[in-house]
């Protein structure tokens, strides 16, 4: 077991927007221990989503070092990053991002379709994941037959199906009412307790942030703790 | 990602928008159908023409004056034909029949028709199959006596008299001159590409020369039909005819002022012509297949734009570039291959229909679908799907995951 799941050092990210350079992150360092529940807070435009994208290997930093599970990801190519996203990280989005035509089961199976590991019985693993989020009786429903809370549960099942070390959630309760939101947060915390999965939650809701062990506030691309 | 599940996924995606999928496929269906039908017609035409040429007999030769390559050639004549028939100098020749050909107006009590007029000698029946339903072929007295006698093709008889029998002894006018009908040719049917005996009128060569089809030189003829004693003797007959005619035309170093055609030459020529014809038809149909392919590319580009977010999500959960590329290529190939299969069936039905119509109109055309044409169309349509799918698929594969996820 490495000391840190996430070890990001002096990360900068510069976007080119036409003629203008946008400095989204200006030398930001963060370390996250295994099993931690961390929330990243900040106003819109502060760079919190950019940070999550980089931590989740959806994007590359302009400069700085990033070690995920002790491994440097700075020099990995697109396919290697895809593999990390596939197995090392699970994503939960604000707008769920389920495939509308596919059943809950097929949605949860999706990450396994892109895994090199073919020995597992995909259907069985996906069913177990759906049972773990309390949707055992809804596995053949399509997204339009599910409520918002249920869709987010499917998304969580999809995020954990390849058993990643980290789950990254970008405003996971942003599109949900309070009750469903509380349920989703409860579910995520429960996963953390049972599986030891590290949770990184991007939010601007202080109530959500209060439920986590540690809060990082970002403003203008820097951390203010 | 394994191939089977990719295939199922692609099928699901295609069936989710059935109208669009069907319309896109229609382009390929029409394209492949047209290629198959056109190639079938081309091949059918070729087979019909080749069959026709083979029908004239393998031991037949045609001798004609070479007006194309030689200045002032000596025209071939009745005397040339007689010399060719000489068994001492031309042992390989069985018979030789000079003819002159032209067209003339044939009338009977106000009814008139245009006929292909052929002036023949009594030997004509030895080189061409002449079957009469009534009357008899010209005898030597009729030939030498410049008889005003005519043998009518069945269509001509039908046009003039409205019947095809009981006509021997009637008098018709050819170019205004009275001729007695001495025989009626047996109906052959089918299309002989403008050369059917059904539309011919035969008269004695001497009469034709004197009164109907005058030629510049006395005794000049248009063609001498020569039959060799056997199909193996065709080559030696050709050599003997060449020697005889060169001697008679007093040629020393000059090239031949006549040419000799045999069935092989005609077959070669016909195959070349029909081959070009087939390629032309197939090429025109191929253009519609190309247009169908562009339709696929168009719809795949729309599909990539519509599914940008889906592509982003797939990349976020671990899809590699290759996975996305393959997914879209499978979709476009499925479109073209399924369209291609339906197109082959359509083309087959189409050529069946054309064959029926041709048969109903007495036109000798039997469209033939060859395995090559089917393979060509299948491969071509699959290639079209792949080729026109590459650009949209590549565009999908190269989308940045965060950009793609951000789009609504």
Image (cartoon, rainbow, N blue to C red):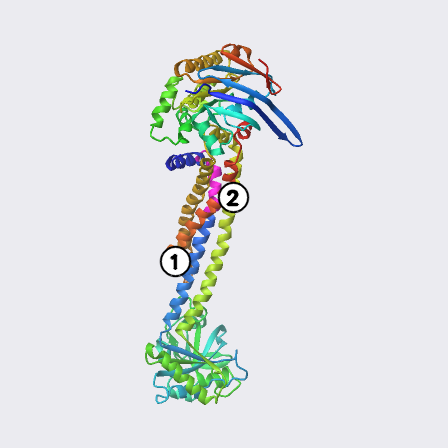
User: Disc 1: which chain?
Assistant: B
Please tell me whether residue B19 belongs to the stretch shown in magenta: yes
Q: Which residue is mark 2?
A: B295
What is the chief secondary structure element of the magenta stretch? helix
Indicate which disc residue B31 carries.
Answer: none
**Which secondary structure, mark 1?**
loop
Residue B23 rendering spot, x and y as whole percentages: 49, 41
Q: Quadrant of the C terminus of chain A?
A: top right
Frontmost residue, B37 versus A66: A66
From this viewpoint, which residue is outermost toward the right?
Answer: A19
Frontmost residue, B300 versus B187: B300
Say which residue appears at 38% left-offset and 37% top-offset.
B3
**Which secondary structure, mark 2?**
helix
Lateral position of residue A52 relative to residue B190, left or right? right
- Residue range (magenta): B15-29
Q: Which residue is mark 1?
A: B368
Dot 1, crowdedness within 10 Å: few (<14), some or many (≥20)? many
Q: Do we see residue B408 in this rendering?
A: no
């Amino acid at each position: 077991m490495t000391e840190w799941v996430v070890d990001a050092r002096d990360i900068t990210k510069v976007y080119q927007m036409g003629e203008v350079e946008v400095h989204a992150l200006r030398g930001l360092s963060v370390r996250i221990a295994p099993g931690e529940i961390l929330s990243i807070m900040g106003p819109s435009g502060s760079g919190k989503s950019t940070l999550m994208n980089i931590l989740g290997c959806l994007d590359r930093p302009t400069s700085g070092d990033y070690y995920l599970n002790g491994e440097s990801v700075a020099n990995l190519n697109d396919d290697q990053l895809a593999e990390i996203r596939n197995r090392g990280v699970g994503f939960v989005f604000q707008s769920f991002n389920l495939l509308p035509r596919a059943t809950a089961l097929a949605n949860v199976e999706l990450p396994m379709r892109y895994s090199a590991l073919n020995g597992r019985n995909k259907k069985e693993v996906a069913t177990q994941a759906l049972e773990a989020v309390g949707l055992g009786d809804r596995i053949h429903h399509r997204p339009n037959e599910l409520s918002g809370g249920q869709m987010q549960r499917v998304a969580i099942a999809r995020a954990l199906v390849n058993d990643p070390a980290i789950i990254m959630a970008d405003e996971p309760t942003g599109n949900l009412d309070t009750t469903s939101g509380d349920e989703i947060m409860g579910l995520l915390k429960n996963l953390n307790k049972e599986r030891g999965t590290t949770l990184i939650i991007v939010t601007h809701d202080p109530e959500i942030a209060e439920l986590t062990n540690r809060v990082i506030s970002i403003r203008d691309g820097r951390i203010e703790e | 990602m394994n191939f089977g599940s990719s295939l199922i996924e692609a099928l699901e995606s295609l069936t989710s928008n059935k109208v669009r999928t069907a319309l896109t496929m229609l382009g390929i269906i029409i394209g492949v159908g047209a290629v198959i039908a056109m190639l079938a017609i081309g091949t059918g035409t070729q087979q019909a023409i080749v069959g026709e040429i083979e029908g004239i007999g393998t031991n037949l030769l045609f001798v004609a004056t070479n007006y194309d390559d030689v200045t002032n050639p000596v025209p071939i004549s009745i005397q040339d034909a007689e010399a060719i028939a000489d068994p001492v100098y031309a042992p390989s020749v069985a018979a030789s029949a000079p003819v002159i050909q032209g067209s003339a107006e044939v009338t009977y009590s106000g009814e008139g028709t245009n006929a292909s007029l052929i002036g023949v000698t009594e030997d004509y029946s030895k080189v061409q199959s002449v079957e009469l339903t009534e009357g008899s072929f010209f005898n030597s007295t009729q030939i030498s006596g410049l008889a005003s006698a005519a043998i009518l093709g069945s269509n001509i008889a039908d046009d003039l008299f409205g019947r095809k029998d009981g006509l021997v002894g009637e008098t018709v006018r050819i170019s205004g001159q009275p001729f007695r009908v001495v025989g009626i040719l047996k109906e052959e049917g089918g299309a002989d590409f403008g050369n059917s005996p059904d539309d011919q009128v035969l008269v004695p060569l001497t009469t034709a020369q004197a009164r109907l089809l005058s030629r510049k030189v006395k005794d000049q003829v248009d063609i001498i039909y020569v039959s060799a004693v056997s199909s193996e003797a065709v080559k030696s007959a050709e050599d003997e005819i060449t020697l005889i005619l060169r001697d008679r035309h007093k040629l020393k170093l000059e090239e031949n002022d006549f040419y000799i055609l045999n069935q092989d030459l005609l077959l070669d020529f016909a195959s070349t012509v029909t081959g070009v014809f087939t390629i032309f038809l197939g090429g025109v149909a191929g253009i519609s297949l190309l247009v169908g392919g562009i339709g696929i590319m168009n719809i795949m580009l729309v599909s990539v734009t519509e599914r940008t977010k889906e592509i982003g999500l797939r990349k976020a959960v671990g899809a590699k570039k290759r996975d996305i590329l393959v997914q879209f290529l499978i979709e476009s190939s499925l479109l073209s291959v399924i369209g291609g299969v339906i197109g082959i069936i359509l083309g087959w039905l189409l050529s069946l229909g054309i064959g029926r119509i041709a048969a109903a109109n007495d036109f000798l055309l039997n469209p033939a679908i060859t395995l090559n044409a089917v393979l060509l169309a299948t491969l071509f349509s699959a290639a079209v799907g792949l080729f026109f799918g590459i650009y949209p698929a590549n565009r999908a594969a190269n989308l940045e995951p965060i950009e793609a996820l951000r789009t609504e």
